Image (cartoon, rainbow, N blue to C red):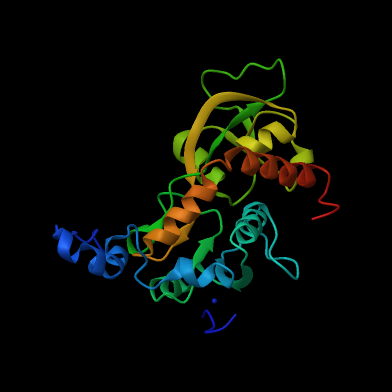
Amino acid sequence: MVGATGWMRRRAGCRAITPVVAAAALLATSGACQFPRDVEGTLERVEGGTLRVGVIDDPPWTDLSGSQPHGVEPELVRRFAAQIDAEVEWIEGTESDLAEALRGFQLDLIIGGLTRSWPYGAEVAVTRPYVDTEIEIGVAPGTELPDELGGVEVWIEPNSEAAALLKQEEEDAIQVPFDSLEEIDGPALLDSYEIDAIGYERTDYILRDDEHAWATPAGENAFLLEVEHFLLDRGEEAEDLLHEEAERDVAGRPDA
């Protein structure tokens, strides 16, 4: 379980007031008409304070194999924390445990390869997507992919989500397992950034399109807006980080 340490309101209506009382009422009413607002005051607390981030292990988005979380999203969180002058407190856990902690306002963010279709998204707030990735078939430059994949060997990570997708969509394709990207020698079902990292070409044979996002507590609308504003122009940064992670995989991860 997640440790205790570690990890809407509609806009209030502003009634018209007479000039006689306007000056006296200004300070009392201005706060009530601010929007968006946080139910628990998250943005005010984390600015210059501590940002509690729940982390689900899901390389290359998040990697918990070291002493500190690393990968694409921990790097982005560090950049966000620097922007709001916050220290980061990392809390590792499972999706269900971290989602429960977020619901109870014991966390401020959850990261870990989440998408807009995250099963716990209805119970918390999920940001707008900041980067899209596809699971698709890549081929060596100059290679044509047959119209039908029956009997065609397709390199794939064993016991993976991609393997399940391929079995569902192309049951007669022959799955060839690989342990590292450098082993691939033929058509391969990969994430789009992995295709780029091994110098393959995308075929537009896409089995799934993922919209990646972060999760925040429900009702913390000012904080959610701050996070979304940060993520708005981070798509290119995220893609660069994804390519770096994939290239490390190709090279045997010498410097994670």
Q: Residue at (86%, 52%) from the top-left corner?
A: 254
Instruction: Give the answer, above or below, for where 112 lies relative to 44.
Output: above
Q: Which of the pair 150/155 is nearer the observer?
A: 155
As drawn, is 66 to the left or to the right of 169? right
Q: Which of the pair 120/157 is nearer the observer?
A: 120
User: Where is residue 122, by image quadrant?
Assistant: bottom left
Q: Position of residue 80 (x, y in %)?
A: 60, 56
The residue positioned farthest toward the right in the image shown:
254
Q: Residue at (52%, 84%) from the top-left corner?
A: 4
**Count of numbered labels shown in the rendering:** 0
User: Where is residue 192, by image quadrant?
Assistant: top right
Instruction: Give the answer, above or below, for where 214 lies relative to 105.
Output: above
Q: Which of the pair 25/128 is nearer the observer?
A: 25
Residue 245 at least partly seen: yes
Q: Position of residue 153 (x, y in %)?
A: 64, 31
The residue positioned farthest toward the front in the image shown:
20
As drawn, is 127 to the left or to the right of 185? left
Q: Residue at (49%, 55%) from the top-left corner?
A: 227
User: Where is residue 138, by image quadrant?
Assistant: top right
Q: Which of the pair 172/3 is nearer the observer?
A: 3
The residue positioned farthest toward the bottom in the image shown:
4
Q: Residue at (45%, 40%) from the top-left corner?
A: 168
Instruction: Give the answer, above or below, for where 43 lies relative to 195.
Output: below
Residue 156 at least partly seen: no
Q: Where does the C terminus fall, quadrant-wise? A: bottom right
Instruction: Give the answer, above or below, for where 148 lies relative to 72.
Output: above
Q: Position of residue 123 (x, y in %)?
A: 34, 64
Q: Position of residue 235 (x, y in %)?
A: 57, 40
As drawn, is 193 to the left or to the right of 166? right
